[in-house]
């Protein structure tokens, strides 16, 4: 009986190569989804589109998880409410950001959030070098592009701060809510939080079945596919390995912006993205493993 159970359990754990492939698929999916979303901004606002994305992914997660909400104490709800608020504001701010600046630049600035979490968790002086490298990358972003929208940059910084909060709160949520229950409830909270922002201006676009279908497709690409891939991949990969792979996000976002939206970046800006990617890889590889592996959400 024991041997049979072991073989069944092992069959559900992907090989290391498969796990890496799944993470890369998830990264490509979320950034392609963001690029696809940007092509729709002429028809629906960033706020309307991010609401559609979160609503569609929340419906899928609630249907899959069927979270148990009875018997929860006050702390359970405070944690998941904070988790949902960080998720909602992060996505809203990110969509506001890349509606104003190139996707690759928005993700690069936003990535300062999880990078800060990795560095602060390390407590090693040499990790200050990674902070310096990332800071240099951010400074380089504005060196050749004087017309970079300051509001877009500000929204990216807000998204990065919320991403850092999401990572920290996801660990607490995972300890207090089973399986996908916490993520499903947090997704519903994020949708409810953003619903008042749709008042008035979004009624017609959101009533269009075609826009609703596009919003569902963005939700599938940006949430359901990457979350599913990461969930399976983390059965094999250590948190540090996962973090290194996630460091590819800014470069993947820049490529998606180029291929899907036609956003051309200057050589110095590609160098800036490279600095942030290297800083993220370095900080992740030198940070001690967390108590509990928790996947940060994909940007976009």
Image: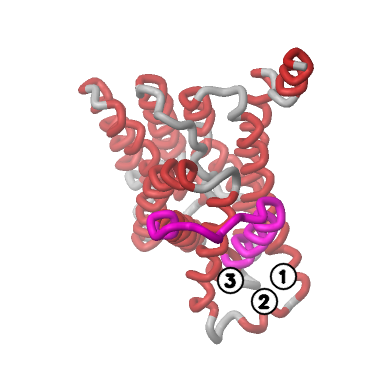
Tell me where residue 63 appears, x and y as whole percent.
71, 57
Label 3 close to label 1 by CB (< 8 Å)? yes
Tell me where residue 6 appears, x and y as whole percent.
72, 17
Q: Earlier in the sequence, mark 3 or mark 2?
A: 3
Tell me where residue 148 appears, x and y as whole percent.
39, 56
Q: CA distance from mark 2 to mark 1?
A: 6 Å
Q: CA distance from mark 3 to mark 1?
A: 10 Å
Q: CA distance from mark 3 to mark 2?
A: 7 Å
What kind of element bears circle 2?
helix
Give the label on residue 48, or none: 3
Tell which residue pokes out farthest to the top in this image.
3
Q: Where does label 2 land, which residue?
A: 206
Q: Which residues are magenta?
A: 51-78
Q: Where does label 1 land, which residue?
A: 211
Give the label on residue 263, or none: none
Label 3 close to label 2 by CB (< 8 Å)? yes
Relative to residue 114, is residue 95 drawn left or right?
right
């Amino acid at each position: 009986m024991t041997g049979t159970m072991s073989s069944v359990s092992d069959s559900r754990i992907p090989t290391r190569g498969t796990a890496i492939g799944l993470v890369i698929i998830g990264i490509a999916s979320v950034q392609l989804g963001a690029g696809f979303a940007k092509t729709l901004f002429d028809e629906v606002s960033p706020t309307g589109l991010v609401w559609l994305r979160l609503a569609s992914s929340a419906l899928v997660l609630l249907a899959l998880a069927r979270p148990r909400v009875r018997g929860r104490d006050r702390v359970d709800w405070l944690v998941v409410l904070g988790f949902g608020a960080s998720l909602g504001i992060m996505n809203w701010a990110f969509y506001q950001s890349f509606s104003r600046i190139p996707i690759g630049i928005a993700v690069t600035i936003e990535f300062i959030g999880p990078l800060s979490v990795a560095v602060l968790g390390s407590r090693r002086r040499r990790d200050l070098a990674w902070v310096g490298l990332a800071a240099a990358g951010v400074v380089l972003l504005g060196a050749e592009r004087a017309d970079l929208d300051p509001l877009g940059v500000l929204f990216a910084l807000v998204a990065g701060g919320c991403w850092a909060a999401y990572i920290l709160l996801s660990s607490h949520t995972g300890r207090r809510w089973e399986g996908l229950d916490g993520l499903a409830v947090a997704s519903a909270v994020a949708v409810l939080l953003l619903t008042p922002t749709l008042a008035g201006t979004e009624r017609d676009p959101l009533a269009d079945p075609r826009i609703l279908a596009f919003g569902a497709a963005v939700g599938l690409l940006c949430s359901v596919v990457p979350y599913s891939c990461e969930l399976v991949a983390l059965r094999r990969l250590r948190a540090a390995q996962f973090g290194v792979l996630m460091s590819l996000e800014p470069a993947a976002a820049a490529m998606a912006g180029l291929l899907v939206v036609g956003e051309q970046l200057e050589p110095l800006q590609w160098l800036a993205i490279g600095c942030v990617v290297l800083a993220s890889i370095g900080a992740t590889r030198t940070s001690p493993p967390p108590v509990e592996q928790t996947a940060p959400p994909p940007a976009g």
